Image (cartoon, rainbow, N blue to C red):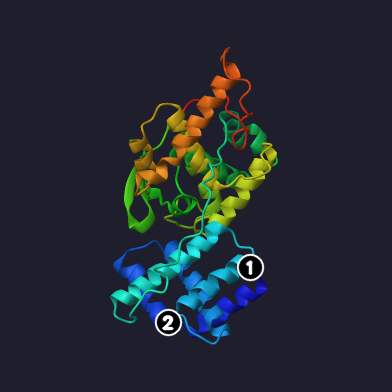
Amino acid sequence: MKKAQSTDVESSERSPSLIRAYLDFCRIEKGLAALTVDAYRRDLLHYDGWCHQQGSSAEVPSDEQVRGYLDSLYDSGMAGRSIGRHLVSLRNFYRFLLAENQITHDPTALVPLPRQWKSLPKFLNRQQVENLTGPVALSGDSEGPQRLRDQAMCELLYASGLRVSELCRLETADLNAELGVLRVMGKGNKQRMVPVGKQALAAIENYLQSARPQILRARVSKHLFVTARGGPLTRQGFWKALGLRGQRAGIFEGLSPHVLRHTFATHLLEGGADLRSVQTMLGHADISTTQIYTHVARARLRQVVDQHHPRAQRSRPPIPPLPLGTDGNSRKDPQ
């Protein structure tokens, strides 16, 4: 791990010109999100550092070089999904160089993506959501103002299905409490409007009136969820706060902000929402990304039939429990 980190540092100091040009293209012309561009940068600099260790360069394409790099990722024990992401980064980079007439062939054109097993997204059942946002999770929490802030963020995340980066970037001007809608800037600077339910709005109002002024202490900030310095709470900071709340709620493994996003989508579909509406609220560019949640709903239906129908096929192999628990009935559909 340390070796890979030092490789990135050395490559960053060299900052190859064609890699810089490609990243500028992604940021300016394609309008990709900063986090996406940063991920491309890390992947390409890691690849370039490996190439220099082999006595070559990332800017001089070679089929053997690309395959050797992927083999090194396999040998390091990297997961297939992560290796696939590295290959996509290289493929997009070399396609850019080919379009700019910097190279004559794409060394990744014939390299297949690693086989990836599709796993159902983890989600919470309704009782777990109640525990996470209720008095159990609040007991012994952080200081009072921060507790109300984290409470409002959890409620909003479950009520809207935002990505954690979108949640942390929110500004006070993005929320229209009277209409109950939130303006969200998603991937690729694409803007969408997301409805917010009464329970989340009440938690946000409580935070704005009671906690936010105490956190800022006369400072002025445009951000909705702030720290004592006036800046936005970071993704890492919220991840940590969510983990602590999850432990108090009895959720010890697998809890992340994205689990709440999955929970939002799954509960909507279980409640009868149509797939297109869920796609719009999640900000998915392609509906195929949203369709993974329909598999969760089907698995849930089969489990209900097998457990409760008098003539269900009991000889069928047992169905493993859905991730993070089975569903309950204590909470209404996400507001």
* Residue on which the image places disc 1: 75
Classify residue 197 by image quadrant: top left
Between 236 and 24, the one lying in front of the other is 24
Give the percent coordinates (x, y) of residue 86: 49, 66
Q: Is residue 118 visible?
A: yes
Q: CA distance from mark 1 to mark 2?
A: 24 Å
- Tell me: 93 left or right of 267: left
Rendered-image quadrant of the N terminus: bottom right
Disc 2 marks a residue whose amino acid type is Glu
Q: Residue furthest top?
A: 310
Q: Residue at x 36, y 32 (%)?
A: 274
- Mark earlier in primary sequence (1, 2): 2
Q: Element at badge 2?
A: loop
Q: Residue at x 70, y 41 (%)?
A: 140
Classify residue 281 by image quadrant: top left
Graded by Cα atoms within 10 Å as few (under 14), some (14 to 19) or many (20 or more), the crowding at tag 2 reads some
Give the percent coordinates (x, y) of residue 275: 37, 35
* Residue on which the image places disc 2: 59
Q: Element at badge 1?
A: helix
Between 120 and 175, the one lying in front of the other is 120
